[in-house]
Image (cartoon, grey):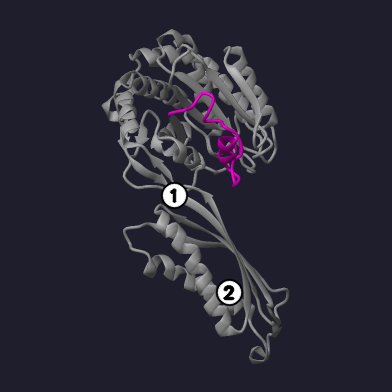
Amino acid sequence: MGKHPVLKRIKKHEETLISIRRHLHRHPELSNQEENTAAYVAEMLHNLDLKVQTHISPGHGVTGLLDVGAKRTVAIRSDMDALPILEARESSYRSQNEGVMHACGHDCHMTIALGAALVFTEMRDQLAANIKFIFQPAEELPPGGARFMIEEGVLQNPPVEAVFGYHMDPFIPVGQIGIKDGALMANADYFYITIYAEGGHAAYPHRGQDGVLIGSMVVQALQNITSREIEATRPAVVSIGEFKAGDAPNVLAHKVEMSGTARSFDDEVRVQIPQRIDNILKHLTSMMGASYEFQYHEGYPAVDLNPQINQYVRSAVRDVLGEDALLELTVPKMGGEDLGYFLREVPGTMLRVGVYNPDKDCIYPLHHPRFDVDENSLLYGTATLIQSILNYVHDRR
């Protein structure tokens, strides 16, 4: 590790990458509030003499186009937003925006994209395709930013033929890159249920209707969908995360509100789940003499990775970091990611960049208040991303 020319090239910019990452980490901004972050990114792209577009829907989207006059264009996508988390870790680059933290690695994602822009600009005479850098707001807050940027034409002018994404992964050791063909992350949908009952005195339940009992029956019945109605080889999850009912210990609840999420990979299953939730609600509330309201919102689509593009990534990992650095992932994740919107438009991939290093206390999961990365991952992730794109572009000339 360390002899590959792309890794050597990015190594020269190590201090710059770390400086960028730490600046972004100090100044996190929540979804749809990434004004200063977007301005910082745009300035960096302007300094590299890229064609920059700002204020892309839903408001803070930024793109930079490295136009080398080629007929083909590939894109690198990075998200920008942070999370409403109070950072618990003390460091020189601790968040200065109290209660907001880059706990999902988006500061690193932006750094890798900017590092790639820096190196590709130096190599522009060697490129057989234009490179479009997409900086997307609001990944953490559905409906997200990807869909709106696509609707505004971010994959056009010039038309993009492939998208390269990536994500920091605290379960993969630093120096390794994870890759998986096909489904990597799930469809992520959300639903909201309100049950209306008569209520009554808790001492005389036979004279009223118990909303909590009805709601509990619904929660239990929903688990039958994934355990008894969907084939076991088609992964799916239905979970209730919120349940609100009642105002006093001696009063039967007349209203129950609950919300939850449904995850799946199969589009048929994605359609089946809300139909079955509505059917369960209809029959249970009818049986108990209650009524209901049901709202279901399709969220981020599944992240499905292109096997052919992944072959270029595998080759890049082996060449840049060595054979042992390639980690073949076998189990998809039930989490959601709006990169899926891009991958429904054009083929692409998502590298999982290892950041785990217990010697540096980089052991905490994403969205944890003590999450941090081994910053060597910035070099490895950037170099692998660059070489993956070079492999793809030059092989398809």
Question: 30 left or right of 158?
Answer: right
Depth check: give the residue in front, 32 or 360: 32
Residue 215 is left or right of residue 196, and the answer is: left
Q: Earlier in the sequence, mark 1 or mark 2?
A: 1
Q: Is residue 149 visible?
A: yes
Image quarter of the C terminus: top left
Location of residue 301 in the rendering, given as x and y in whole percent from the top left corner: 48, 47
Q: In the rendered structure, does residue 131 fall within the stretch colored magenta?
A: no
Q: Position of residue 272 (x, y in %)?
A: 44, 63
Q: Is residue 92 visible?
A: no
> In screen coordinates, is 320 left or right of 367?
left
Looking at the rendering, which quadrant does residue 72 occupy?
Answer: top left
Q: Are marks 1 and 2 in contact (CB under 8 Å)?
A: no
Q: Residue at x 44, y 15 (%)?
A: 70
Q: Whole-percent x and y of residue 74?
A: 45, 25
Residue 158: x and y in percent read 51, 23
Q: What is the magenta range?
A: 137-161
Which secondary structure lies at badge 2?
Answer: helix
In magenta stretch: residue 146: yes
What's the residue at 58%, 38% (across, down)? 151
Which quadrant of the view contains residue 157? top right
Q: Residue at x 50, y 62 (%)?
A: 239
Residue nearer the viewer, 299 or 70 = 70
Give the residue at mark 1.
186
Label 2 belongs to which residue?
215
Give amino acid for label 2: Gly
Q: Kindly report the secondary structure that dominates the magenta region of the rendered protein.
A: loop
The residue type indicated by label 1 comes to Ala
120 in relation to 288, above or below:
above
